[in-house]
Amino acid sequence: MKKEREEEKIRIATLLLENYSHNIFFNNCTNCGKLARTPNAKQCRFCGYDWR
Ligand SMILES: [Zn+2]
């Protein structure tokens, strides 16, 4: 039974990841379009643009 619960957790995590992957993995600079350093970054490391 414990194993089943683990699998359910993984299934949900995968679903969440798929639903939010565009937010999590593609934090692009709105100025130059390049990928920011981290998902939560608010400043571009390439052009220095700040979108806070
Ligand atoms: Zn930029």
Image: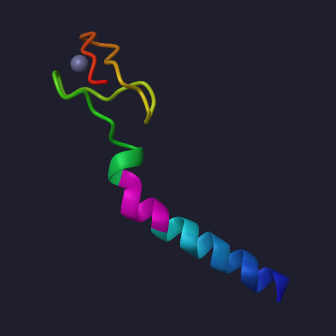
Q: Determine the main secondary structure of the stretch shown in magenta.
A: helix
Q: Does residue 20 belong to the magenta stretch?
A: yes
Q: Nearer the viewer, residue 17 or 43?
A: 43
- Determine whether 14 is above or below 34 in the image: below
- Determine whether 44 is above or below 39 in the image: above
Q: Which residues are magenta?
A: 16-21
How is colour applied across the structure in the image?
rainbow
Residue 33 in the image: state x and y as whole percent: 19, 28
The picture quadrant for ligand 1 comes to top left
Residue 11 in the image: state x and y as whole percent: 57, 75
User: Quick one: which residue is furthest to the left in this view?
Assistant: 31
User: Quick one: which residue is furthest to the bottom in this view?
Assistant: 1
The quadrant of the rendering that contains the N terminus is bottom right
Residue 32 in the image: state x and y as whole percent: 17, 22
Q: Does residue 46 belong to the magenta stretch?
A: no
Residue sitting at 35 percent across and 14 percent down?
Answer: 45
